[in-house]
Structures are given as structure tokens and as C-alpha cells.
Image (tube, helix red, strand yellow):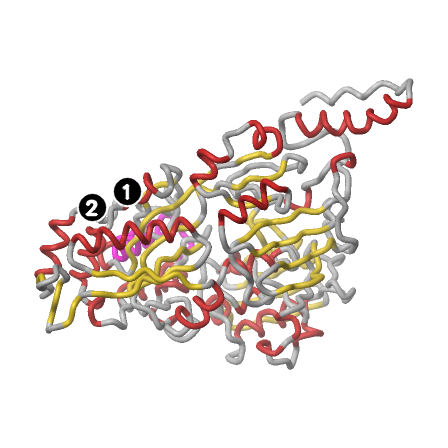
Amino acid sequence: MRPLPTPGRATSPLARLLAPLLAALALWLAPGPAWCQQADNGDGIVVGVIGDATSMIPMLTSDAASHEMSGQCFNGLVKYDKDLNLVGDLAESWRVSPDGLTITFKLRQNARFHDGAPYTAKDALFSWRFMTDPNTPTPYSGDYLKVEKAEALDEHTFQVRYKEPFAPGLASWSLTQMPAHLLEGQDPRKSPLNRHPIGTGPYRFKSWTPGSKVELTYFPGYWEGRPHLDSLIYRVIPDMATLFLELRSGGVDWMGLTALQYRRQTDTRFFEQNFRKYRYLASAYNYIGWNLRDKRFQDLRVRQALSHAVNKEEIIEGVLLGLGQECTGPLKPGTLWHNPKVRRYPYDPDKARDLLAQAGWLPGPDGVLVKDGQPFQFVLLTNQGNRYRQNAGVIIQRRLAEVGVKVELRIVEWAAFLREFIDKGRFDAVLLAWTIPQDPDLYDIFASTNIGPGKLNFNAYQNPGLDRLLEQGRRTFDQGQRKAIYDRVQEILAEEVPYTFLYVADALPIVHARFQGIEPAPAGISHNFIRWWVPKALQKPSLAP
């Protein structure tokens, strides 16, 4: 790209007044993600989200809101770059032993915590101990219990040795690095860091008003250099229509659009001039999770029948307006690990009725199926604020009614949804989504060892054969062999339907056009967030650090 022309010398008071604004406007309107002039510091960004965090220690939570809001406060040892390659974060380099059992990390010497304390191998060692301590209520301990020995060899060298080969081992060290000097000997559930995180990330915590907003300010001592934006604010607005109004009025700079907003409500001159829209397949799949503690859903024929009764194409076209695709399993379509040849459940209400009849569910006098004198009715839970899921729930409710199953759709506030229903296993069925990992390891969600309060296998799915495959996949480094293992894992999940897989929606972020430096990539748009910037003449006043 050619450099932008330099404005000529201003020759009048009006010209001198307008020159900086016109230069900034030229940058703002020009195409392309990067600029030849130096990026300006200042301004801040307001992100609109529908759910609040539950904790600012991300390893204690399983909800996306907590991870997103605290994510810029922390680093791991490694991370994925824009092309989804594993690169160093707090580790500047690493070495894997020939037998694959030992990883030695060389840590950066210029990283510091937000309170000024240096980050060292002692903190890496503590972070591992934190994850493997039985008193730490984390759903993610499984990866770190595989480590036989961890030690700080010196101030900037951290080494782990595994009990046996563990293929996701390196990627697992994206683990949030915690401050040993603030957490050692503390009960993590009672730690002030739950409300006031202190990490090594590019932004440091300022305030959290529950149910309203989280405010972060840039960390001047960040090892990668100062983020260009002074502040990062998350505003919690549970209703998507209200959130969209805030975007239009300037109260929010960045949000994820609904399909309707993307297709019809932003196709105007105002939005074309003031915002930039993006579209790519999201790394998350939506599903119905059947509580397998419930005798009704323990019958495979019932789960298969209900899967045939749901019209997925109707949801994709009617709710997503075509901005997404059918989901057949827990790995992302179009990627190496996805198996497109698994059993599918096309919409077939007649087959659904036949399977339900085989399972003993017969029509009652009011059309609702009955077995042993009990009508087939259940509650489908989903979270407040996600209009996709709520609208999909209405379609699911209607289609299941057509085969004789009565569904009550119940919408619950996010924090209560997790605390009172998911973590305790108190539900019939849920309409939810999981983030799709870059590594195909599915152990945390589907292994029977992860059933229990606060665990990720919250619908209590058990299959010893699948458990063995999940373990085998973790021990196998050869890509071809791993591919065969996870292909079979996906086949089993499709055959046994602990989930009815529904759809993968397109991600539809929209960002105010004053923000420059955005580079769409396989990883999305936020991979280089600390390099986003706003020309001086277009900046709004922002929070002081």
C-alpha cells in the first residue's frame, strides 16, 4: 500500500484548524487495516455484552463472560496467533524432549504484574499448583493433573514433566498465570482477586459494577508495549435490542450483531459511514443438552427421536437468516479435525413418532405422549439475552409439540442459570453453546470423570468406550492417528446424542469506524486488540490510568 499523501502547509487560520481533522478523516475513511503513519495513543472502547462475569479469576469459571472480561488482564505461557498457530506469550521459547514427556519454558524477563511485582518461574509453578490443588474449585484441572513434576529451574525457567505422553500439553499452557505473592496460602473462593484481578496483561482492573459494567485501563508496564487504547469498558446490557440502540446512539462501540441486525437494521447510510461490519464462522456450537440423570432421556431412542423432531434448517433460515450452518458435532466445520461423515438427524417427525412409540410413549387424550401414566413434558432452559437461543427455543417447542412432547421454555438470568441449574445439574434439558477449541481434545466436556457439581460434563454423559478414546487421543501425537481417534469420537457422539447438535452461527461483530488497525484473520478480529487505535482528531475523552 502506498503512503497516504502528507497535507500541505496550512496558509490560513481556517485551514490550520481543519488540517488535522481532514487528515484524520482521510485515515478513517481509507480502506485497509494498517497504516504507514504512527498509530496514536488515547481514546477507549466500550464493548456491549449480554452477560455479566461471575468471577475475575477465569480458571474458576466456565462462562464466556468471565473469560472475556478478565482476558485482557492476564497472559498464558503460550497463545494462538491470528492464523491459529501456537506462539509464545509469557514464554519467549520452549523445548520439548524427544520422548514428548518434558517441556522446558524460557520465560520473558520483562513481564510484571499490575502491582509492579516481577513475573517469574515461581508464578508459573504456583499457577500449576493452583490448578491441581483439590481446594481450587476449577473445572479445568484435568490437563494439569497429567503433570508428574513441575519445577522452577531458575528465576526464568519453568519445566514440567508428564506421567505419559500428552498431546494437548503444550496448548494447555495458555493457562492464566496467577500471582503467587497474592494467592499463595489463600482460599481462592475468598480471594479479593475474584473481584479485583491482578495479572500481567495489557489492561489492568479499575472497577466492576455487578450487572452494569467492568472498567479496565491500560497497563503502562506491559511487556509487549503500551496498548494504544487507554481504556476498555464492558457494558452489560442483557437485551439485544437495547444494546443495539446503545450502539446507534454512541453508548457502545463494539458488539456482536444478531442476524436481523446484520441483514436488515445496519444496511443504511448511517451504519455504512460510522461502523465496520465483519462476518466469519464463529468458534462455538449450539446444542440441546439432555440431562442423562433423567430416566426419560436415558433411553437412546428418545434422544434420537427428539433430534429428528427438531428442524435445524428452519432454525438456521428462520432465526439465523442463513448466517450459519448445521452442526453435526463438537468440532468446527471445515477444519482438519471435523468429521463430516457422522450420523445425521434430518427433520423427520414420522420417524420421531415411531422411535418414541418404540420407547413406550403413546398418545394421550390431549395429544401429549404418555408412558406409565406420566405425560411427556419437560422444561427447556436457556439464558437471558441470547435472542438466537430464545427464538430457536420457540421453534423447538413447536416442533416437539407436533410429535406429542410438551415443552416449557424458561429463560433465566445468566449468573443464576449457571449457579442454580448448570453447576447443580438441576435441569431437564438446556439450550446452550460451547466454545470450539483449536485442539480436538474433548475430555473436559465428555469424559465421565468430569461429572459432578461445577464440572463441565454437567449433563452426566457416560460411555466407557468414549472415555478410552478420549484418553488415547490425549496420548497420541501423530496427527493422522489423532484424526482417526477424534473421527470415531464424533461418530459415537452422533450415534448416542447426549447433545442434539444444532448450529454454528456466523460471528457478526460490528465496530465503530474510528478504530483503526483491525485485521480480520482466522482467529477473528480481536487477536491484535492492543494494536487498535484511533486518530487524535477522532478521539473521545477516555479513562485515565
Q: Secondary structure at mark 2?
A: loop
Residue occupied by mark 1: 314
Between disc 2 and disc 1, the foreground one is: 1
Left or right: where 401 falls relative to 275: left
Mark 2 → mark 1, Cα distance in angstroms: 9 Å
Q: Are marks 2 and 1 in contact (CB under 8 Å)?
A: yes
Looking at the rendering, the stretch of residues picked out in magenta corresponds to 475-493
Which residue type carries mark 2?
A: Tyr
Which circle's residue, 2 or 1, is located before the other in the chain? 1
Q: Residue at x 31, y 46 (%)?
A: 339
Nearer to the camera, 114 or 126: 114
Q: Residue at x 40, y 51 (%)?
A: 478
Whether residue 225 is visible to the viewer of this picture, yes or no, is no
Residue occupied by mark 2: 347
Q: Toward which corner of the image does residue 217 lie, by quadrant?
A: bottom right
Q: Toward which corner of the image does residue 346 lie, by quadrant?
A: top left
Nearer to the camera, 116 or 354: 354
